[in-house]
Structures are given as structure tokens and as C-alpha cells.
Image (cartoon, grey):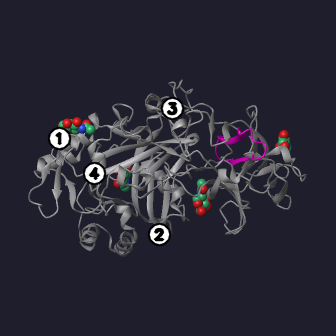
Amino acid sequence: MHCLVCAFITVLMILTSSDAARMMELSYHSLPCLKNVSTRKEVSMFSEIETTFKLPSPLPTWPPGGGFAGGAIDLGGLQVSQVTTFNKIWAANEGGPGNLGATFYDPVSIPQGFSSLGCYSQPNNMPLFGHILVGKDVTNDISNPTLKSPIGYTLVWSSASLNIKKDGDGYIWFPNPPDGYKAVGYVVTNSSQKPALERVRCVRSDLTDSLQSDLWIWGPSKSLNVNGFNVYSSRPTNRGVQAMGATIGGFVVQNGIGGNTLSISCLKNLKGNVVNSMPNLNQIETLIQTYSPVVYMHPDEPYLPSSVDWFFQNGALLYHKGDESNPIPISQNGSNLPQGGSNDDTYWIDLPKDGSSKERVKKGDLQDANAYFHVKPMYGGLFTDIAIWLFYPFNGPSRAKVDFINISLGKIGEHIGDWEHVTLRISNFNGELTSVYFSQHSWGAWVSASLLEYATGNKPVVYSSLHAHASYPKPGLVLIGPAGVVNIGLRDDTAKSNKVMNTGVRPMVVSAEYLGRSLVVEPPWLNYERKWGPKIDYDLNKEINKVEKVMPGKLKKSFDKFVKSIPSEVFGEDGPTGPKVKDSWSGDERA
Ligand SMILES: *[C@@H]1O[C@H](CO)[C@@H](O)[C@H](O)[C@H]1NC(C)=O
Ligand SMILES: *[C@@H]1O[C@H](CO)[C@@H](O)[C@H](O)[C@H]1NC(C)=O
Ligand SMILES: *[C@@H]1O[C@H](CO)[C@@H](O)[C@H](O)[C@H]1NC(C)=O
Ligand SMILES: *[C@@H]1O[C@H](CO)[C@@H](O)[C@H](O)[C@H]1NC(C)=O
């Protein structure tokens, strides 16, 4: 829907462990959009919603200072707090993801003085793990309060005429806001009687912003029918480090394409100053100790991560356009790399020239590799995003599965200097991990904390794919290919091995702009904005011909078509840039 590559690619998921079993269970998921590569997960066969998810270990005591993990955040006359206890109102027991239905809840145990802003909903195929915001007017201004009750309700939808498995009937109501106010959530009831006006509050318009639908929560049929009625999670339309919008964590409904959502809004942090709710340096350290992921490389992986300093010290060279015969060694923390500028092709980094150093550097240095942490505010300072970057000196050739054989694509997909990341999203109300973003090639996926694997304590497990180092929450094989083609795909293989990196050992916080430039000094290499490897020029046809030599004749044609259909961004042909050049540095993750 939102992403460019969606139209071209089908992701084929194979999740069992042995190749033989895989062949039996080939389930080719035709996903028009890549964003649910991983949210799809191993679709459970039974309802998990009856259990409430809790992180494996209790949260630590956060070091003192500021408003981080302080329970409430002031958006400018409107204080918000997060409620995670719910009372079930209504459930559909079929339709939606996995055809397991969805459940609708009211927030309960609302703190004194706060009011509900809307109901929560989630699919039944995962444990209950909800966070919804409640609000409190702290202006003491009776003439212009930040919250007001609705003046009535409009029935948006009811299950009454729907012949599905359901717990009684559900009714979804839109709170009609008074002039100058906006509804930020729906009310759900299990009777046809209109809810009481006191049930929710609407929010003064200047404290609101626009939102859009995100992941599918429910619809009456087992696969998404965009022409019908659907319930989605939501996210602000404008997202990024500077954007001030934040949803309450509720849902939006849509009746058909462009169908009316009766203009539900999200909240907006009017204060614009997010530092108050964000972690200070000590708190960042504790967050890293608590949540730093454990990254498993594939057992066959020859191209492991290294620290950036190791890469420089072991012979990486800086080239300057027009003076290609005089590359220069890079000093320790990159202090002689050109700073700023733009991603033009005037400079680039390459491996050492002599053959044995080159091969050695390609393999990285897992023992002493560092993980690099970038800490940034998200959604008006209600969340802390911690992006964890790993550097791999070399990205191996793409691998393909053609019928039953594994094929290495030679030069295709290879490049020098590979930056990969995962991002933790942490609630600033209590410091709890809510989800993790796994970057995969030129896309990625958010996965709820409730669906992650944990190594020790609350440290999520990340699997790095063989050669390409795409990040996944589960081991196994992911095939990437154009819609409709089922016997050919690019392979992302992931598995546990003893090649493992605990990102919390030797962590380096390289940037936290909101704390000011003097508290966290960025290493010079971070501000090198050109490519970390040369642009690789190869003749695609020639490479394809080489690969096809080992292939049975009848496959050649479809293989040829397949490789040419893959957008070049999947192969990383544009050349590898550093963390700061990626859109996610100041934007939201691309999902
Ligand atoms: C992923 O997208 C497809 C098609 O839009 C849909 O059928 C499927 O339910 C989605 N899965 C999730 C988990 O959103
Ligand atoms: C109906 O909704 C009320 C809250 O309004 C809830 O307490 C009750 O348990 C619900 N009934 C069923 C059968 O879920
Ligand atoms: C293909 O490669 C994967 C990853 O190295 C390996 O596990 C699998 O056994 C290989 N399959 C075949 C048929 O060689
Ligand atoms: C980088 O290294 C040089 C010397 O190798 C040193 O003078 C400089 O302070 C270092 N800069 C940072 C940001 O660590």
C-alpha cells in the first residue's frame, strides 16, 4: 500500500526447520505489501488473546532524572498516561488475521483524574498486549478546557446483521465532538444503547493531528477485503524525530476504500519540547543493559561484523574521484574522512588492495565488534527509539533458490561496507519495550514485543541472514520473489549458531541529538555522508549467464526473468551509505 516495492514482490515464507519438511509445507504467502513480512509471524492456530503478555523479566529501577518513566506526560495543558489493564467488551471469533477474530476492550484502572479517550482492539492471534492513553485536563481553564465530553454518538458499525462466530453483538460508536474539539478514539459497546456522554472525552483541536490506518486488526472475512468493513491500528500521518503527533493506541475503522473513518484524529504534543520525557544518559545506559539485542549470525556466515575502527586500522582506504591511484588510509575514528556534504560520488571507501588483507578484512572481526546506538524521540516524545547499528565490512553475494537447488548469484548483490540495524521502541511512560523494527534489505517490519524471542532477561533475539545480513525475529528461510512465481526466490537464511553478538557488550552511543551535541559526541565517521563501498559495476547479463551454466535448461528462462524483475534496491546496487544518510535517521522506520 505505502511502499514502492510492494507491487513487485511476493514474500514466500517457509518456517519449518528441515529442508525436507520445508518442501512439504511450502506455503507461498502472496503478500501485496512487504510490510507484513514479519508481523505475519508463525500464524497461530489458536487464540492467544486469553493470555496477557508480560516481558520475561521485571523492569529495572530506572536511574533518577527528568520525566522519563514518570507515568504521565504533559502535551501542553493535556496530561496523558498509559493504561495497560483492560475489560473485554466484545469479540468476533472469526475473520481477521489467521481467521481467529479480534477483541475490543475498555481501559480500566484509569488513574485518578484521568478520562478514557477511546477503546482498544487487537487480533486474537496474539497475546493481549495493549497500551492506550487516557487524558487529564491540567489547564484549570474552564472557558477553554483541553478535554470535553462528546455531544452525542454516531453508530458507525454493528455486528448485528453479521452471521459469524461472535460473543453477542458489538457496536462501534463515533463520539460527536463539540465545536473546536476532535474525537481521538471510538467507543465500543455490547448493546445497541448509546453510550453515556461521560464515557469518553474529545480533545481540543490544537492538540490534535491527522492519522492514518496501519496494520489490519480485523474484518469479517479471513483475508483483508479492502472493499468491506475493516478495523486497523493507526499511526500519525506525519512521523519522525521532529513530528509531534501520537495516537492514543486505539484503532480506526474503514468502510471500503476511502471509506469514512469519521475523522478520528491523533494527539499532538503542543509543547514541542520532547527532552522532558526522554531518557538521560544514565537512563540510556540502563535501557541498553536491559534491552540490547543478541544477534545470531548464520552458521555458514563468512562475512561477520567488525568495529568501524578495526575496519579503518586494518587497511580500509579512502578514494577521491579523479585521484583513484592515490587512495589514503583512514585514521582511527575516521577523523580524516570528509565531513557532511552529500551522497555524491566524489569519495568512497574500499577494502585494502593486497589480496590477503582484502580477504581477511571481508571476514570482519566478531570478537571485538561494537554495536552503535542512536537514541531519538518518536511520536512527540512519547516513545524513545533506539536504533542499533552493526557494521559488516562485506555483504556476500545474493543467494537464490531455484526449484530445489541453492544458487549463489556471483557478483549480484555483493558489496563492500554493509550497515544494518534494528530499532527498539520504548514507552517513555514506564520504560517498557513495546516493539522492535527489523530492517530487511530496503524494507523492514515492526514486531510487537509480545511476539519476540528473548535471549536472557528482556534482551530480544535477532537473526542476521546469510550474506545479506537482513534482520529477522525468527530463524528459518524467507524467499523473496515476484508475485506469482513460486519455484524461484532470493533466499534469506537465518539460524542460531555460535557466531553471536551481544550488542550490549562494548555498546557505543554515537548520537542522541536531543541531549545536545556536547553530551554525546558523534564520531567523525558518522558524519561521513558518502558511500562506504565503491559502486559495483557489473554486466547483469554476463553474471546471469555465469549462474545459468549450472542450471537445467528449462529453468534458465524463468530465472532470467526473475533476476531482472527484482528492483535494484534489493541488491543494494546504489552503494552502501552510513546510518546518518538513511531516511530512518530522522524519520520513522520504513514499514
Ligand atoms: C498482510 O497483508 C495481506 C494482504 O493485504 C493480508 O491478507 C494479511 O492478513 C496481512 N497480515 C497482517 C498480519 O497484517
Ligand atoms: C458488555 O460490556 C460491559 C462493559 O460495558 C462488560 O462489563 C461486559 O462484561 C460485557 N459483556 C460481555 C458478555 O462481554
Ligand atoms: C541451501 O542453503 C541453506 C543455507 O546454507 C542450507 O541450510 C540448505 O541445506 C541448502 N539446501 C540445499 C538443497 O543445498
Ligand atoms: C579521533 O582520533 C584522533 C586521533 O587518532 C583524536 O585526536 C580525536 O580526538 C578522536 N576523535 C574522537 C571524536 O574520538
Closer to the chain start, of discs 1 and 3, is 1
Q: Mark 2 or mark 3, which is nearer the start of the sequence?
A: 2
Q: Position of residue 258 (x, y in %)?
A: 67, 69
Q: Position of residue 11 (x, y in %)?
A: 49, 61
Is residue 252 left or right of 40 when viewed as pictured? right
- Residue under pointer 3: 458
Residue at 34% from the left image edge and 44% from the top image edge: 390
As drawn, 58 above or below 36: above
Labels 3 and 4: the sequence-earlier one: 3
In the image, ligand 2 is in what quadrant?
top right
Distance between mark 1 and mark 3 Cα atoms: 34 Å
Q: Please give the name of the residue rendered at 37% of the width and 44% of the height, measured from the top-left corner.
A: 389
Q: Main secondary structure of the magenta part?
A: loop
The CA distance from mark 3 to mark 2 is 37 Å
Looking at numbered disc 4 in the image, what kind of residue is underneath it?
A: Tyr
Pinpoint residue 44: horizontal percent, then vertical percent.
62, 47
Which residue lies at the image location 67% right of the left edge and 39% below the top edge? 79
Camera-nearest label, 3 or 4: 4
Residue designated by label 4: 528
The mark found on residue 567 in the picture is none
Residue in front for this viewpoint, 272 or 455: 272
Residue for badge 1: 313
Q: Secondary structure at mark 4?
A: loop
* Label annotation for residue 8: 2
Magenta segment: does it hold 414?
no
Q: Residues within 10 Å of mark 3 (few under 14, many from 20)?
A: many
Q: Quadrant of the N terminus?
A: bottom right
Q: Secondary structure at mark 1?
A: helix
Give the amino acid at mark 1.
Gln
Magenta range is 119-144
The amino acid on which the numbered mark 2 sits, given as a three-letter code, is: Phe
